[in-house]
Image (cartoon, rainbow, N blue to C red):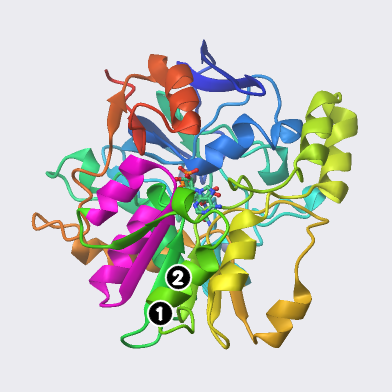
């Protein structure tokens, strides 16, 4: 089959790889109909390169049709239309019973000290072949799927594997009080959906980014936006001026480890990326430093006694964090990968013809797999209006 594979820093290709097949009784194989590129893939494209292997199949946002099942997949059947959550979880261990599916004790990648295995997400998360491919093997398939109704187009459900539940959890974790204000840093796909969800829940929402068309998408939906390019040095003051001088109740960081405007903290990552990966992976894991500008902004912006929710992925082990300010401001911090299936029952009723979240028109690009290399580049550079890219193996 054809699949999008990693070959080096900023080097993804479309290769022929062996077709996946059922290996365990709890496996299923799906024929992928839609699979998206995510901001998380961009971390693998560059800073997390030391943890990648040549030929690794990328992708963790797949949906499609079941074509093969093992003998222990519960009520999952060949022909079912499904979305595949980006984390592989069993549904019956202690963590899964707490709905902490990203911590599944059956699939935890213990030799790396990581939580649940993830599709297409480096050695840190089990080096499981990903879903930017014609077919995907789904381990723990008895639980690692969301059944979808037939009828509506793929667009309706294409974001259930990751960014819609991620944005939902980000807003939940932000603990915005009734009638309160949420600032969303970063208006990529995750921050964009977070703004839409927060607005749907009746909060005041202020979005921040520096890419004109991303700001415009939300302005058109009635979200107040702040252009970071006009406030590189005074973002906190600008937002306090909009929020009674106090700051918002909550801030959601939907940027993560590659924030614009950070000083040269990427030195370790860059240096590690140039070393042979056997040496650089341990080095990066103990010495990695994120580009922390968005987190610093969040700490500055949030009001005293407020909450910061981190959806953006961080991976450093030696990040300098201003504990003095966080302690003094009495900030609550809640973070992590999204526990996808936990939020599906709340999101599903919004995926109707009325389309209150605007999922049907959310994608900016629908491309064949063969165009993945160019799509990765443009999505990373944020050029040509790239916000959310769907890859369609059938095109
Ligand atoms: N927690 C999870 O389960 C989960 C799931 C999916 C994605 N993520 C993470 O969420 C983050 C966003 O993902 P995305 O798909 O929206 O990607 P993205 O990279 O397209 O979005 C990031 C946005 O942040 C903006 N930005 C950069 N620096 C900024 C700054 N200092 N202040 C404000 N905005 C800034 C960029 O212009 C961009 O629009 C990534 O870190 C990704 O890994 C987490
Ligand atoms: Zn994703
Ligand atoms: Zn489990």
| Number of marks | 2
Pinpoint residue 99: horizontal percent, then vertical percent. Answer: 51, 71
The reply to whether callout 2 and callout 1 are in contact (CB within 8 Å) is yes
Label 2 near ligand 1 (CB < 8 Å): no
Q: Residue at horizontal 69%, vertical 78%?
A: 326
Quadrant in the rendering for residue 128: top right
Pinpoint residue 104: horizontal percent, then vertical percent. Answer: 61, 61
Q: Which residues are magenta?
A: 191-219
Q: Residue at horizontal 38%, vertical 34%?
A: 35
In this rendering, would 318 be left or right of 337?
right
Secondary structure mostly seen in magenta is: helix
Residue identifier under label 1? 243
- Real-space CA distance between mark 2 and mark 1, rounded to the nearest whole angstrom: 6 Å
Query: As displayed, is residue 357 above or below residue 182?
Result: above
Residue identifier under label 2? 239
In this rendering, would 359 be left or right of 195?
left
- Locate the N terminus by quadrant: top left
- As helix, strand or loop, the secondary structure at mark 2 comes to helix
- As helix, strand or loop, the secondary structure at mark 1 comes to loop
Q: Residues within 10 Å of mark 2 (few under 14, many from 20)?
A: many
Q: Residue at horizontal 72%, vertical 38%?
A: 123
């Amino acid at each position: 089959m054809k699949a999008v594979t990693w070959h080096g820093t900023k080097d993804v290709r479309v290769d022929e790889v062996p077709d996946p097949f059922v290996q365990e009784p709890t496996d299923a194989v799906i024929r992928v109909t839609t699979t998206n590129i995510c901001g998380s893939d961009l971390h693998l494209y560059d800073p997390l390169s030391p943890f990648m292997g040549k030929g690794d199949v990328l992708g963790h946002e797949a949906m499609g049709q079941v074509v093969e099942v093992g003998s222990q997949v519960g009520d999952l059947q060949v022909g079912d239309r499904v979305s595949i959550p980006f984390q592989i979880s069993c549904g019956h261990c202690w963590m899964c019973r707490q709905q902490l599916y990203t911590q599944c004790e059956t699939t935890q990648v213990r030799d790396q000290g990581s939580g649940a295995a993830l599709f297409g997400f480096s050695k840190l998360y089990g080096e499981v072949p990903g879903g930017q491919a014609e077919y995907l093997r789904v381990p723990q398939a008895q639980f690692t799927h969301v059944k979808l109704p037939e009828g509506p187009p793929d667009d309706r459900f294409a974001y259930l594997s990751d960014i819609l539940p991620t944005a939902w959890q980000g807003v939940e974790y932000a603990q915005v009080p009734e009638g309160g204000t949420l600032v969303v840093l970063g208006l990529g796909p995750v921050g964009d959906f977070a703004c839409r969800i927060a607005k749907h829940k009746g909060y005041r929402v202020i979005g921040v980014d520096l890419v004109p068309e991303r700001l415009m998408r939300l302005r058109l939906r009635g979200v107040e936006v702040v252009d970071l390019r006009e406030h590189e040095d005074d973002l906190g003051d600008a937002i306090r001026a909009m929020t009674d001088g106090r700051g918002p109740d909550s801030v959601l960081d939907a940027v993560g480890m590659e924030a614009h405007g950070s000083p040269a903290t990427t030195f370790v990552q860059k240096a590690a990326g140039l070393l042979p990966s056997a040496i650089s992976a341990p080095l990066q894991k103990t010495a990695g430093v994120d580009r922390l500008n968005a987190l610093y902004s969040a700490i500055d912006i949030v009001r005293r006694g407020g909450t910061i929710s981190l959806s953006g992925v961080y991976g450093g082990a030696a990040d300098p964090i201003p504990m003095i300010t966080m302690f003094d401001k009495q900030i609550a911090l809640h973070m992590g990968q999204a526990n996808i299936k936990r939020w599906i029952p709340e999101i599903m009723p919004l995926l109707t013809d009325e389309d209150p979240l605007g999922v049907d028109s959310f994608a900016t690009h629908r491309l064949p797999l063969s165009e993945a290399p160019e799509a990765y580049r443009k999505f990373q550079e944020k050029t040509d209006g790239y916000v959310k890219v769907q890859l369609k193996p059938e095109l």
